[in-house]
Image: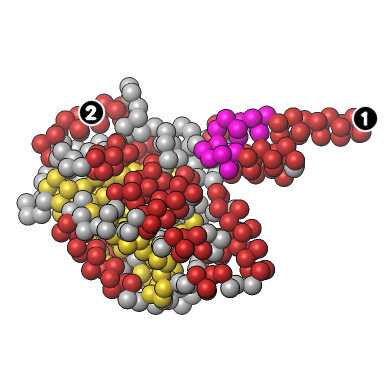
Amino acid sequence: MTSWLLGTSIMLIHLLGIVSAVMALMSSRTSQGAVAWIISLLTFPYVALPAYWFFGRPRFYGYVTARGARDNVLRRVLVRYRHNIKPHLSLPTSTDIQAVEQLAMMPLTKGNSADLLIDGEATFASLFEGIDQAKDYLLLQFFIVRNDALGKRLQHHLIKAAQRGVRVYFLYDEVGSRKLNDGFLNEMVKEGVEVKAFRSSRGFKHRFQLNFRNHRKIAVVDGKQGWVGGFNVGVEYLGQNPRHGPWRDTHLALSGPCVLGLQEAFWEDWHWATGEVITLNWHAESHPQDDHHVVIVPSGPADKQDTASLLIQQLIHSANERLWVTSPYFVPDQGVQDALRLAAMRGVDVRVMIPERPDHLLVFLSAFSFLPDMLRAGVKIYRYLPGFLHQKVMLIDSSAATVGTINLDNRSFRLNFEITAFIPSTVFASKVHAMLEQDFAQCRRVTIDEISQRPMWKKVISRAAYLTAPIQ
């Protein structure tokens, strides 16, 4: 009887392995991923089966976007909002901008202000000032929130806002903020703050969606002011953690019609987390002084296409003179690697800035496996020396720039919910250019000899680490 049960169990596991291999064949986003899963599931089903079901799912199911839905409350509100925003729309001046619009499924708006916030003190001073000015509602979303000195300062401002009658909606990722204790959250709830976790595995139906994260950082005040960029909430983002040292990051303060794009992304995330459709201000107001054009680009695993990866590739292909990129995690997929190399080969000044000090060892090691090809093609790789580099910024020629949450790795391209502001403005691009010039002055340039002369055992480890790139 025991041997019969054992034999039956083995047969069942192998049968499930075959079924899962077929699912991987039909649903994996890349051929490399499909081959890897199929071989693993057929050869080592005892290990590969649980790994596939928790880490191999290619799509995030159950998430509803207003842009994609055909007949629901979100869609009906969106139709009214898009009607209100029509006077603030701008026609794309190039097919490159048009492509970004189509990827974002959001419009290019005019009449916006966009101010760079360089490093933590400037960012949180701006954010806290905006929170204190709120009259109707506040939308706050972060990937990481810590119960430390900075977290308590944010908590204080949110509680004060709630006490004066402002509706406060606070959303955090349950994985990124897994160390956040209930006491911190309950104190806000007690004072009237609406607090929710973004749980990718919400409910039994979505129990296998553990590998997805909400990496967005969004703040919106009354539908008029917004913030987006690289900063989470913790003292390390102010450079107060000795392990990381000085923290280099960039955020963006926005006002004008584009803020409604940030609001829409939060609104959809809140709907997933709670099932609620909250009432917000959807009437756009142009900024009286500035006139930046902005497209807000949300991306994530619920998209029908790989929005983040396609966005990066589009921006690379659109560059003619200069493409400067900063990313703390640099393990791009093959399409982005090829685009970077081709840009360098056609004479574009392609520079990639990454940290000297890693905070994720696998990501750090993985880069060594493909950097030689990058360097040989003419891509210039720089390592930032003073501390940890965390900003996610791109400069395209002298005409456009992006600030957002997308890292150049598979997790940001396919597993995370992300958001980026694309700003086709020469004035804004000149400010980003000046900022990045100062950053590059504090970097060292990586050489081909440095990479190629590493010991063989280090090269083997790097190749092995690169195999884990799809789930890093």
The magenta-colored residue range is 19-34
Residue 240 is left or right of residue 209, and the answer is left
SS category of the residue bearing label 2: helix
Q: Position of residue 176 (x, y in %)?
A: 47, 55
Residue 165 makes an appearance in the image: no
Spot occupied by residue 345 in the image (x, y as percentages of width and height): 38, 57
Note whether 78 is above or below 216 in the view shown.
above
Q: Which residue is mark 2?
A: 79
Extreme residue toward the left, this view? 288
- Answer above or below: position of 243 versus 335: below
- Answer with mark 1 or mark 2, whichever residue precedes in sequence: 1
Q: Amino acid at mark 2?
A: Val
Q: Is residue 30 magenta?
A: yes
Q: CA distance from mark 1 to mark 2?
A: 64 Å
Q: Is residue 171 above or below residue 144?
A: above
Q: Main secondary structure of the magenta part?
A: helix
The label number, if any, that marks residue 1 in the structure image? 1
Q: Quadrant of residue 417?
A: top left
- Front residue of 373/16: it is 373
Quick check: 343 left or right of 292? right
Magenta highlight on residue 317:
no
Q: Nearer the viewer, residue 177 or 307?
A: 307
**Cβ atoms under marks 1 and 2 closer than 8 Å:** no
- Indicate whether 179 appears above or below 444: above
Q: Residue visible at 93% across and 30% down?
A: 1
Mark 1 lies on a secondary structure that is: loop
